[in-house]
Amino acid sequence: MAEVRTIRDPHAAPEPDLPDHVTQPLLAVITQRSLDADYEHVAARRRAAGDSAPTYRVPRIAGLVLLVFGLLVTVAAVQTSRNASASDASRESLVEQINLRRQGLSDLQAQLDREGSRVVALRARTHDLATEERAAQSRLERLGVRTGFGAVRGPGVEVTVNSAPDTAGGQLVQDADLTLLTDALWAAGAEAISVNGQRLTVLSAFRNVGIGILVNAQPISPPYVLDVIGDPDTLPANLLASAVGGKWYALKDTLGFRFDVRNGGTMSLPSAPAPRLRSAEVAPEDSGRRTQMGDSGT
Amino acid sequence: MIAALGLLLGVVLGLIFTPDVPAGLDPYLPIAVVAALDAVFGALRAYLEGIFDDKVFVVSFFSNVVIAAAIVYLGDKLGVGGQLSTGVIVVLGIRIFSNVAQIRRYVFHA
């Protein structure tokens, strides 16, 4: 220990009245004072009392303390080993849990993959269905234009029909006359017709009611203005040339109807109110839509 | 002789009864054992130097154990239990080593 002291303290001897723990490094002091000072103290007192013989007897109390010591060491060792097994067990159970969870995780991952591919498939299906729906929608629109259940606009002619001005009451324009005229117009290439704002549909018919005519269950009265969408250049000529048209011209000349055809420019025709289906239902098959349209088409 | 007997008896008793240490005292047992070890080696050295005193041994043994455990307990309460127990172990370890070195000198007259 003296070496340590000289190495640590290369100057002259330290102040004699300073205690060791001030002049020396901590570890050196600990090392030097490893023996309890009390032993020295008691020995010195005993020497002072005249009993200078070294004592080598071990009293019973020391044996008792050693017993306690042995007990302490054993208990600590036993406890540690017991704890070790306990912590081993808990570690094992943790590992087991980790594996279980990992398994669950991979299961969930697989499920996620499955669901993901399902989502992709469903998305593709949605896309297909949307395309189909668009196709059906445009088909519906086309059919609406054709059948009269969709508003249309386009170039056309305005046809005005009225009874003869000097008629004696017998020669009013009647339902059959208008039917003939519209047949002639259809034959001449008309694509959509409305009579006094009532769009003609595939289900429309003219019926006499008093001096007026009922179309689409709405009464209309003369003069009858027919908005006809079709080629304004060819339609009047076709009307004249067709057989039904010829019949119509003959009829109107016979009955003295006032009849006027003129270019109507670009016209907008309203749609007829869609008929409510009471008995017919959509068939469950894929062809359901078609069947429903077929219904309104017949 | 009586010392070896006591030690042996203690170990045997511990093995037979394996008393359960309360969970609260569990962390302080190893420190207490190291402190007791220090006291025992100090006593052995004192015995070999011829200055053994039973009273000093008993007092140093129990005070070592109690103080070491108390320091660690205090450290635990302050949140520095790990550091304090390291400090206690270092000091006690150095003392044990130097005491054992001294004992070796006496035993082998080196």
Image (cartoon, coloured by chain):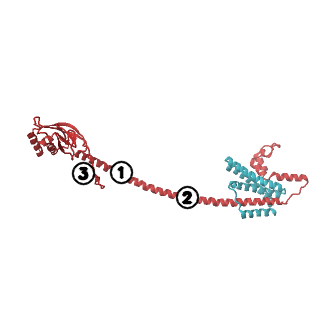
Q: Is residue A157 visible?
A: no
Mark 1 vs mark 2: which is more N-terminal? 2
* Label 1: chain letter: A
Q: Which residue is mark 2?
A: A97
Q: Nearer the viewer, residue B110 or A106?
A: A106
Q: Amino acid at mark 2?
A: Gln
Residue at 42%, 53% in the rendered image: A116
Under mark 1, the amino acid is Thr
Spatial CA distance of label 2 from label 3 is 66 Å
Element assignment for label 1: helix
Q: Is residue B63 left or right of residue A46?
A: left
**Looking at the picture, how far across and down is residue A205, in whole percent?**
19, 45
* Residue found at the far top of this picture: A165
Marks 2,3: beta carbons within 8 A: no
In the rendered image, which residue does mark 1 sit on? A126
Q: Secondary structure at mark 3?
A: helix
Which chain's colour is red?
A
Numbered-mark total: 3
Seen at 72% across and 64% down, the residue is B16
- Mark 2 neighbour class, 10 Å CA radius: few under 14, some 14 to 19, many 20 or more: few
- Give the percent coordinates (x, y) of residue A267: 22, 38
Q: Are circles 1 and 2 on residues that touch, CB within 8 Å? A: no
Q: Colour of chain B?
A: cyan
Going from the N terminus, do you reach mark 1 or mark 3 first? Answer: 1
Q: Hey, which quadrant is residue A79 in on the image?
A: bottom right
Tag 3: residue type? Asp
Whether labels 1 and 2 share one chain: yes
Residue hosting label 3: A295
Q: Tell me the tag on residue A160.
A: none
The chain letter under disc 3 is: A
| Same chain, labels 2 and 3 | yes
